[in-house]
Image (tube, grey):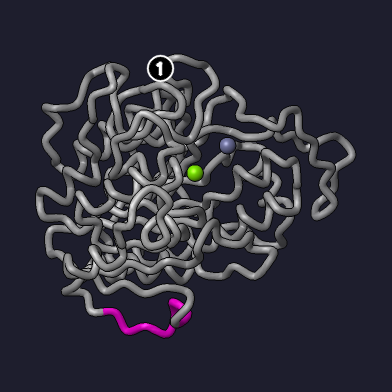
């Protein structure tokens, strides 16, 4: 689970806005990762997610590729190939840099049309996110990728038809739900689906394969709020993401075989909780409207969680996950 731009100060602030512990406080193991990219101490979401997905550092703006521009095999692709169920649930467009790094291989994160095409090359079994326009009303060509998904055994639904909560989903098929044409709304403007979709994803994927599953859930807009230095927006997004974490932890408690890892790809905003702050009356400051280079906390829960304590590169998260899933690591570069 990736809280885009979720650093330690933002998480601390979320805790001090609540009367009771938040779900992040349920994690018994905490570590830190070094988020820098291949060419810059300041990473971006493309390079950050590629490190998690592939296990190698790459250039900022690149998704799912090595520094020599060749495609790197992602943990999601590998899990899918080995018969595990796979899923992506996000509050951005599904072609945004963070989810894209798990299924697409493009030099630039801005290539939304090509990234959408890449989503048809890997069979991601459960998909929830925005960005319907990159699949049906495309600028570059007249392909209808929604029709192509349906031809590939997907049940595809959109916000135009029904709310996500109104579906009974058949776990023997694949499921894709588009929550919006472009970016989903901020939670403060009425978006509600992330906690529900997170729970739905775990239940669906658990039934979809008896070999287990790999699921990436992103609280995408924590980063956008921090870029614009809007503390209320940032905390609302973080608490919505935390609720989703709660849903997944409840599933993991029942299931007993699920490792849950929560982290950010980088810190955004240089968030500070300034002196003079009181509970629920925080004086939140920002030192930047960009990403910063500070270490990012990693929270782990469930079997194998103990491997995530300490300080390590963001790429090590990929290697630890692959080892615990017993996926083949021979194609992963060891940088
Ligand atoms: Mg993102
Ligand atoms: Zn950002």
Ligand 2 appears in which quadrant? Answer: top right
Ligand 2 within 8 Å, label 1 CB: no
Find numbered disc 1 in the image and state the secondary structure of the residue it sits on. loop
Task: Give above or below for 207 relative to 241.
Answer: below
The x and y percentages for residue 279 are 80, 52
List the residue tagged with mark 1. 38
The x and y percentages for residue 322 are 21, 38
**Mark 1 Cα-neighbour bin, 10 Å: few <14, some 14–19, many ≥20:** some
Q: Is residue 46 left or right of residue 210?
A: right
223 or 277, which is in the foreground?
223
Could you tell me what secondary structure mostly forms the magenta stretch? Answer: loop
Q: Quadrant of residue 268?
A: top right
Task: Give above or below for 8 relative to 166.
Answer: above
256 or 104, which is in the foreground?
104
Task: Give above or below for 184 relative to 164.
Answer: above
Residue at image point 49% right, 62% down: 244
Magenta segment range? Answer: 162-169
The x and y percentages for residue 163 are 47, 79
Quarter that holds the C terminus: top left
Residue at image point 47% right, 21% down: 36
287 or 129, which is in the foreground?
129
């Amino acid at each position: 689970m990736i809280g885009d731009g979720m650093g330690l100060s933002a998480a601390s602030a979320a805790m001090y806005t609540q009367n009771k512990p938040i779900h992040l406080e349920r994690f018994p193991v905490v570590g830190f990762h070094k988020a820098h990219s291949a060419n810059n101490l300041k990473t971006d979401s493309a390079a950050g997610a590629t490190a998690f997905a592939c296990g190698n550092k790459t250039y900022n703006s690149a998704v799912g590729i090595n520094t020599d521009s060749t495609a790197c095999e992602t943990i999601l692709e590998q899990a899918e190939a080995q018969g595990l169920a796979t899923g992506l649930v996000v509050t951005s467009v599904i072609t945004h840099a963070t989810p894209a790094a798990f299924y697409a291989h493009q030099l630039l994160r801005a290539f939304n049309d090509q990234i959408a095409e890449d989503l048809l090359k890997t069979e991601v079994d459960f998909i929830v996110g925005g960005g319907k326009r990159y699949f049906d009303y495309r600028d570059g060509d007249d392909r209808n990728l929604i029709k192509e998904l349906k031809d590939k055994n997907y049940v595809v639904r959109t916000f135009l038809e029904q709310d996500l909560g109104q579906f009974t989903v058949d776990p023997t098929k694949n499921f894709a739900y588009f929550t919006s044409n472009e970016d989903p709304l901020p939670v403060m403007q009425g978006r509600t689906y992330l906690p529900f979709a997170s729970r739905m994803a775990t239940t669906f994927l658990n039934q979809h394969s008896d070999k287990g599953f790999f699921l990436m859930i992103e609280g995408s807009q924590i980063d956008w709020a921090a870029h614009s230095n809007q503390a209320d927006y940032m905390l609302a997004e973080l608490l919505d993401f935390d609720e989703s974490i709660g849903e997944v932890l409840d599933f993991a408690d029942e299931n007993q075989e699920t490792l849950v890892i929560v982290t950010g790809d980088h810190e955004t905003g240089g968030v500070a909780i300034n002196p003079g702050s009181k509970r629920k009356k925080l004086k939140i400051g920002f030192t930047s409207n960009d990403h910063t280079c500070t270490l990012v906390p990693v929270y782990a829960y469930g079997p194998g969680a103990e491997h995530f304590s300490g300080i390590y590169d963001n790429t090590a998260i990929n290697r630890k996950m692959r080892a615990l899933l017993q996926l083949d690591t021979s194609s992963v570069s060891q940088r």
